[in-house]
Amino acid sequence: MAALTIQDVSRRSGLSEPTLRYYEEVGLIGPVARDASSGHRRYREEDVDTLQVLACLRGMDVGIEDMRITCARRRRCGMPGSTAMPTQKPKQTCGCGT
C-alpha cells in the first residue's frame, strides 16, 4: 500500500492542508506516520476514509467536539477509517455515507 502525501489527501478529501494538520493536532485523526528521511506526513487509505467523513460533517457545520464523538462511534463499531478491528460486520452505518 502506497503512503499518501498531504497534497494527495487534501485533493481527495476536499480539506485544505492546514485543516489536515489541525485535525491531527486536535486528535481527530492520527497520529499520522512520518517519512523517516523528510519528516513529511504519510497518510493511509484509512485516514482518507475518516477525513472524507470529517469533510462531510464540516460541510454540515458540525463542531469539533461532535466530530470527536462521531469518530469514537466509528471506532467502536469498526467502520472504515477507524483503527478498531471488528470481530463481525457492523449492523449499521456511521458517518455521512461517503
Image (tube, rainbow, N blue to C red):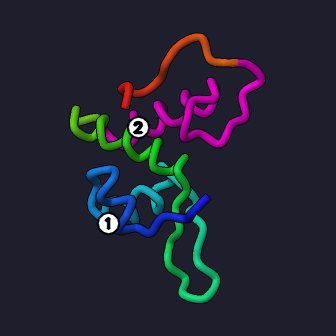
State the residue lying farthest toward the front: 1
Query: For the residues carrying marks 2 and 1, which lies nearer the camera in this image?
Result: 1
Query: Dot 1: what SS?
Result: helix
Residue closer to the observer: 3 or 64: 3
Q: Which residues are magenta?
A: 63-88
Q: Examine the structure image and report whether residue 72 is included in the region drawn in magenta.
A: yes
Residue 34 placement: quadrant: bottom right
97 above or below 55?
above
Secondary structure found at label 2? helix
Quadrant location of the N terminus in the rendered image: bottom right
Q: Residue at x 69, y 36 (%)?
A: 84
Is tag 2's residue or tag 1's residue first in the polypeptide sequence?
1
Find out whether residue 34 is within the magenta segment. Answer: no
Disc 2 crowd, CA 10 A, few/some/many (<14, 14-19, 20+): some
Residue most extreme to the top? 91
Q: Position of residue 65 (x, y in %)?
A: 41, 39
Residue, disc 1: 17
Which residue is pictured at 46% across the width and 62% down the height? 25
Q: In terms of image quadrants, where is residue 78? A: top right
Q: Residue 45, percent across and down? A: 52, 50
CA gap, disc 2 to disc 1? Answer: 18 Å
Q: What residue appears at the point 51 percent right and 50 percent down from the top-left corner?
A: 47
Q: Amino acid at mark 1?
A: Glu
The vertical placement of 89 against 81, above or below, is above
| Amino acid carrying mark 2 in the image | Met
Determine the residue positioned at 50% across, 36% down.
Answer: 71
Is 18 displayed left or right of 74 in the figure? left
Q: Which mark is residue 67?
A: 2
